[in-house]
Image (cartoon, rainbow, N blue to C red):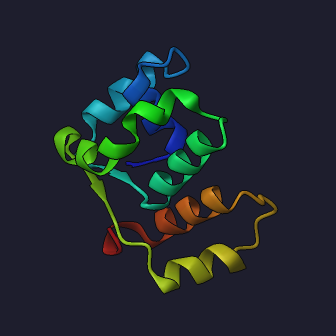
Amino acid sequence: MLLDTYVWAWMLTNDPKLTRAAIRMAEATDAVRLSPISFFEISQNARLGKRPEMGPFLTQLPGLTTGQGVLSGPLTAEIAVLAGEMDWSHRDPFDRIIAAISLYGDQML
């Protein structure tokens, strides 16, 4: 399972937006994965004041994945190119990269 940035952020902050069904899915999967772009997205949004609740987690983010058993895969040139070329009207670069990583599947993570 490859998590969206905000799903992981909601897990960290116990946000009520995270449904019980989503938690059960994450607990039931063999491996929970996170894109490295999620670290950038969280830290940038905290800096810009869009996600101030994430501020206390910033220095801990990379280590938190290890403690949670969450795997962080590589962000390669191939993934970046795929994210840019995808025929998808969604403009958010973070989501495009996460989607491109999911298209590469386990071979890249």
Quick check: 10 above or below 84?
above
- Nearer-the-camera pick, 103 or 13: 13
Quick check: 90 above or below 3?
below
What residue is drawn where x is 57% and y is 65%?
97
Q: Quadrant of residue 36?
A: bottom left
Residue 62 in the image, given as x and y percentages of width and height:
30, 51
Q: Quadrant of residue 72?
A: bottom left
What residue is drawn where x is 22% and y is 39%?
68
- Nearer-the-camera pick, 63 or 35: 63
Residue 73 in the image, given as x and y percentages of width and height:
34, 65
Compared across the picture, whether 25 is left or right of 55 comes to left
Quick check: 19 above or below 82?
above
- Nearer-the-camera pick, 40 or 80: 40
Number of marks in the rendered image: 0
Compared across the picture, whether 109 is left or right of 105 comes to left
Residue 47 in the image, given as x and y percentages of width and height:
59, 44
Quadrant of the frame with the C terminus: bottom left
What residue is drawn where x is 35% and y is 74%?
108
- Nearer-the-camera pick, 56 or 62: 56
